[in-house]
Amino acid sequence: MTPRRVAINAENGRYEVVYGAGVLSGAGRRIKSLGQNTGVFLLCSPRVARHWRRKLERALRNAGLRRTILFDDREKSKNISTVERVCRELIRAGADRRAVLVAAGGGVVGDVAGFVAATYLRGVGLVHIPTTVVAQVDSAIGGKTGVNLPEGKNLVGAFYSPRLVLADRVTLSTLPPREFRSGLYEVIKYGVIADERLFAFLENSLEALANRDAKALDFVIPRCIQAKAKVVSRDEREASLREILNFGHTFAHAFETATAYRNYLHGEAVGWGMIAASRLAARMGLLAPESAARIERLVRRLGPLPSLPDARPSRLLEIMHADKKTRGGELRLVLSRKIGSAETLGPVAPKLVVEVLGHLGRQT
Ligand SMILES: NC(=O)c1ccc[n+]([C@@H]2O[C@H](COP(=O)([O-])OP(=O)(O)OC[C@H]3O[C@@H](n4cnc5c(N)ncnc54)[C@H](O)[C@@H]3O)[C@@H](O)[C@H]2O)c1
Ligand SMILES: [Zn+2]
């Protein structure tokens, strides 16, 4: 397969996402072609490095690799002290304003390294090499970077575009099975909100995709990248179009919060969230019941989801009200009227949300 290239038109410049099998080995050449740099610094985590360090370092050598810096990529280490540690290592390693940081890993590595690139010496070059499904279809694209505070997730950050994104399908082969499957819920999300053909493909080939079939991945991942590119290119800030990426996420966030982020991988919570949002849209008469059933069937085919939180529906609703999309106390949600499109709609009657949440555990 020849690599697929998708252009992102960001506010602060244009960059390309290159997807393919083996694009990692051409990383050095592609980084060199971005222009002169005074040194390349590989930022990675021990877990990703275990599988990919040798390949990464070999690929980056001819672009001027100076140092590999590893940091823990558990969500609890996605914080300001990790940022400080990495910045100090960069200074000691002699990274100057024309250095290029290469972030190789999942969303945590990308978000931390991206924030470092945005702020170290007020900004240095950044290249993403995303190695999870989530990172390839979502977090490496769109320029959002940041870290968590004890008070909440992603509360400190910056918009900062990479110069290049290299998504190598082969890196997904070492991803733990639950992580891989969890990322596929976000893939289903793109089908629902932006790409009916993708949705239909998933209905036909979900099992092949779940088994990491190369052909299935080569169809699906570029289409998701395309979908994200379309949404973020016209509108890099958190405005209305970008909001549709949050389909299923207001519910998901309530499930994650109610279980203190311990029960679900993020994608799994999004799986439940998409079922809830589809049932709600059908209940409101916005989405045909057959379409809601199609979405639910597809989500459930990925495997059993961890059980729902014990919290009462009214408590979950309270958490949902804290969402950024709430206006003047009125709940607004991203809903789909038709598979392949979505929009933010509201106010949504709290009674209906509680009703949907109350029945969510039951199959329709
Ligand atoms: N910036 C954005 O726009 C954006 C979008 C979505 C998510 N995020 C953030 O991304 C993070 C989640 O990212 P994620 O889902 O990629 O999870 P992750 O970064 O936590 O990675 C998941 C696990 O897989 C391991 N791993 C990564 N690549 C691997 C590989 N190729 N082989 C073996 N193991 C590998 C990691 O070490 C980790 O244990 C969250 O912090 C979330 O806030 C950001
Ligand atoms: Zn998500």
Image (cartoon, rainbow, N blue to C red):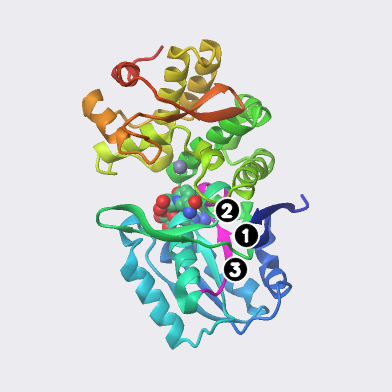
Mark 3 to mark 2: distance in Å? 23 Å
Indicate if the residue with disc 1 has its beta carbon within 8 Å of ligand 1: no
The residue indicated by pointer 3 is 55
Name the amino acid, label 3: Lys
Indicate if the residue with disc 2 has its beta carbon within 8 Å of ligand 1: yes
Q: Earlier in the sequence, mark 1 or mark 2?
A: 2
Query: Which image quarter holds the C terminus?
Result: top left
Name the amino acid, label 2: Ile
Give SS at disc 3: helix
For the point 45% across and 81% down, the residue is 90
Mark 3 to mark 1: distance in Å? 17 Å
**Crowd class of label 2 (few under 14; some 14 to 19; many from 20; radius 10 Å):** many
**Crowd class of label 1 (few under 14; some 14 to 19; many from 20; radius 10 Å):** many
For the point 58% across and 74% down, the residue is 57
Q: Is residue 214 left or right of residue 273?
A: right
Which range of residues does the magenta coloring cover? 123-136
For the point 61% across and 85% down, the residue is 38
Q: Position of residue 23 (x, y in %)?
A: 68, 60
Q: Quadrant of residue 262?
A: top left
